[in-house]
Image (cartoon, coloured by chain):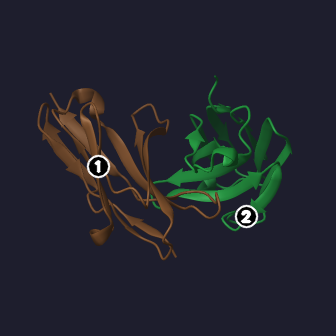
Chain colours: A green, B brown
Amino acid sequence: DAGVIQSPRHEVTEMGQEVTLRCKPISGHDYLFWYRQTMMRGLELLIYFNNNVPIDDSGMPEDRFSAKMPNASFSTLKIQPSEPRDSAVYFCASSSGLTGLPEAFFGQGTRLTVV
Amino acid sequence: AQKVTQAQTEISVVEKEDVTLDCVYETRDTTYYLFWYKQPPSGELVFLIRRNSFDEQNEISGRYSWNFQKSTSSFNFTITASQVVDSAVYFCALSEAKVADGLTFGKGTHLIIQP
């Protein structure tokens, strides 16, 4: 079974540009999470979805960040406009609520650099 | 509020030595899950183990073992006969099980195994 797939793996963009990160969760998983990893703050939960519905976006840093999940197999995290302090590794993860076991399986991450 | 503390920022040992990574957690819930993840230099996050709060049995998987002690709120990870391939950042994480609301991660321990 394919794991969580994220694209792109690396993204370099100029300040002010729009950036879209993409994620395909593991088939059959009904929870999807977006995390951000920085040296200063470590791994932080940004937002999560259950059955394509956003449940908790309290970790989204500001209005420049938005996330969508139009269907069970695809989610996007968008930053508009991007700023240098958004540079980080962004991870998508998925898990199955049906099993009652909350371990999350992570994609390989997208390393975002905003210059 | 939940919190995970990994006091060891970096550990360096020589190959074949045993090494223990410490994890201390805080939660007000009586039902919760604890996890360890490995992040090798390639950057992905690899799930290693999950324990629930009702199961304090230690677990061994090959050279890896985990010691869960509720009395001290600790979930320590030991690698026996370390190998260079064990070099990675290791994260301890906590989930309060009533809702699959994402993981709270520690800051990670960077483990360096020298040949």
**Residue extending farthest right:** A70
Q: Amino acid at mark 1?
A: Asn
Depth check, mark 1 against mark 2: the one in front is 1
At label 2, counting other C-alpha atoms closer than 10 Å, the crowd grade (few under 14, some 14-19, many 20 or more) is some
Residue B68, picture quadrant = bottom left
What's the amino acid at mark 2? Asp
| Left/right of residue B61 with respect to residue A40 in the rendered view | left
Image coordinates of residue B112 in percent, x first then y, are: 23, 39
Q: In the rendered structure, find residue A56 and report the number of the disc placed on it.
A: 2
Label 2 element class? strand
Give the letter of the chain under mark 2.
Answer: A
Q: In the figure, is residue B67 to the left or right of A75?
A: left
Mark 1 residue element: loop
Residue B115 position, x and y percent, is: 14, 27
Tell me how far mark 1 sits from mark 2, CA to CA: 34 Å
Residue bearing the label numbered 1: B58
Q: Chain of mark 1?
A: B
Q: Is residue A92 visible?
A: yes
* Same-chain check, marks 1 and 2: no
Q: Which of the image's four quarters has the N terminus of chain A?
A: top right
Q: Quadrant of residue B99?
A: bottom right
